């Protein structure tokens, strides 16, 4: 589903991703762990073209993201073509980014109507289904200001799911939440993983990684230090840097 080949990313002089090679299979749940500033969030932002890679290639479901190849040369796709590629990928951020003047239902309906061309009735029926999926059918008519942080994040997940994505990206989805609200969001993500959704999750929740991930990727200083099943990477890391990190966080 996702293949990164020698991906580099520079922000001016800052070399943030230093030759990332990574493959995520369809239906796999991959969790990216590592210290702050290791490049985890930048990597998933590059997957759906929120950041343009500086070198290398990024593929999603066989499509070269953001670029087309012609006679051995790469050319940047148009904004419209990139938006079409991105529409197949759901993304959930640290901050919920809900429209404050819209109810939960309207927030979930908006993109399917604007991007997928659904009728109002179709979008509403599907939005109610997605809100039920995240346990918020009774909050459909509430505005974001009337919802807890955990509820707002679950609306954000429902909004992403309403676009019928083939891949879901989560960028530290629980880091802005009060500790007692983290569990409700993680439960929705566990249910989503159990349904077979391909997911890439940047998080500091090591317990979630241990329980749900098919693959754990440990990053530090812009490189993948170690990757494999949770029992190996978390339970029996081979690299000194990985061992040092988990000794501090576990």
Image (spheres, rainbow, N blue to C red):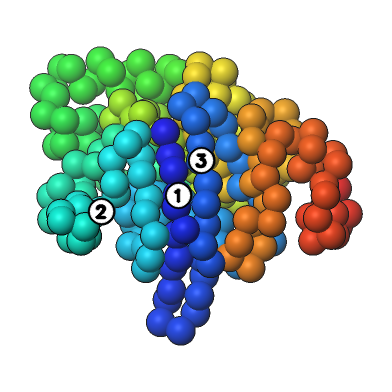
**What secondary structure is marked by label 1?**
strand
Q: Nearer the viewer, mark 2 or mark 3?
A: 3
Label 3, on which residue? 23
Comparing 45 with 131, the one in front is: 45
Q: Which mark sits nearer the N-terminus, 2 or 3? A: 3
- For residue 169, above or below residue 190: below
Residue located at (64% from left, 36% from top): 215
Which of 230 and 168 lies nearest the eye of the viewer?
Answer: 230
Q: CA distance from mark 3 to mark 1?
A: 6 Å
Tell us which disc is closer to us: 2 or 1.
1
Q: Nearer the viewer, residue 249 or 69?
A: 69
Taking the image as shown, residue 49 lies to the left or right of residue 69, namely right
Q: Earlier in the sequence, mark 3 or mark 1?
A: 1
The x and y percentages for residue 61 are: 34, 34
**Which residue is labeled 2 in the image?**
66
Q: Residue furthest bottom?
A: 13
What residue sits 47% from the left and 58% below the top?
Answer: 6
- Secondary structure at badge 2 equals loop
Asked whether residue 171 is in view, the answer is yes
128, 138: nearer the viewer: 128
Q: Determine whether 150 is above or below 65 in the image.
A: above
Give the quadrant of residue 102: top left
How many other residues sit within 10 Å of disc 3, few (<14), some (14-19) or many (≥20)?
few
Position of 246 with respect to 139 (left or right) is right
- Badge 3 vs badge 1, beta-carbon distance below 8 Å: yes
Quadrant including the N terminus: top left
Inter-mark Cα distance, 2 to 3: 18 Å
* Residue located beneath label 1 in the image: 4
- Who comes first in sequence, dot 2 or dot 1? 1
Residue lying furthest right in this view? Answer: 247
Image vertical order of residue 221 relative to residue 237, above or below? below
């Amino acid at each position: 589903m996702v293949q990164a080949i020698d991906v580099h990313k520079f922000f001016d002089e800052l070399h943030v991703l230093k030759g990332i090679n990574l493959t995520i299979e369809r239906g796999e749940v991959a969790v990216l762990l590592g210290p702050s500033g290791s490049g985890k969030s930048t990597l998933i932002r590059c997957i759906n073209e929120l950041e343009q890679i500086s070198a290398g290639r990024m593929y999603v479901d066989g499509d070269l993201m953001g670029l087309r190849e012609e006679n051995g040369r790469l050319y940047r796709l148009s904004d419209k073509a990139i938006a079409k590629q991105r529409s197949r990928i759901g993304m959930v951020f640290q901050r919920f980014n809900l429209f404050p003047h819209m109810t939960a239902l309207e927030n979930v309906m908006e993109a399917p109507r604007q991007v997928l061309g659904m009728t109002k009735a179709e979008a509403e029926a599907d939005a109610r289904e997605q809100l039920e999926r995240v346990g918020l059918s009774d909050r459909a008519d509430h505005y974001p200001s009337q919802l807890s942080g955990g509820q707002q994040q679950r609306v954000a997940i429902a909004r992403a799911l309403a676009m019928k994505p083939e891949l879901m990206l989560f960028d530290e989805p629980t880091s802005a939440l009060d500790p007692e609200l983290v569990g409700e969001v993680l439960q929705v993500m566990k249910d989503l993983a159990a349904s077979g959704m391909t997911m890439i999750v940047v998080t500091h929740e090591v317990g979630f990684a241990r329980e749900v991930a098919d693959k754990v990727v440990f990053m530090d200083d812009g490189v993948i230090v170690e990757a494999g099943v949770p029992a190996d990477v978390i339970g029996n890391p081979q690299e000194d840097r990985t061992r040092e990190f988990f000794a501090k966080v576990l």
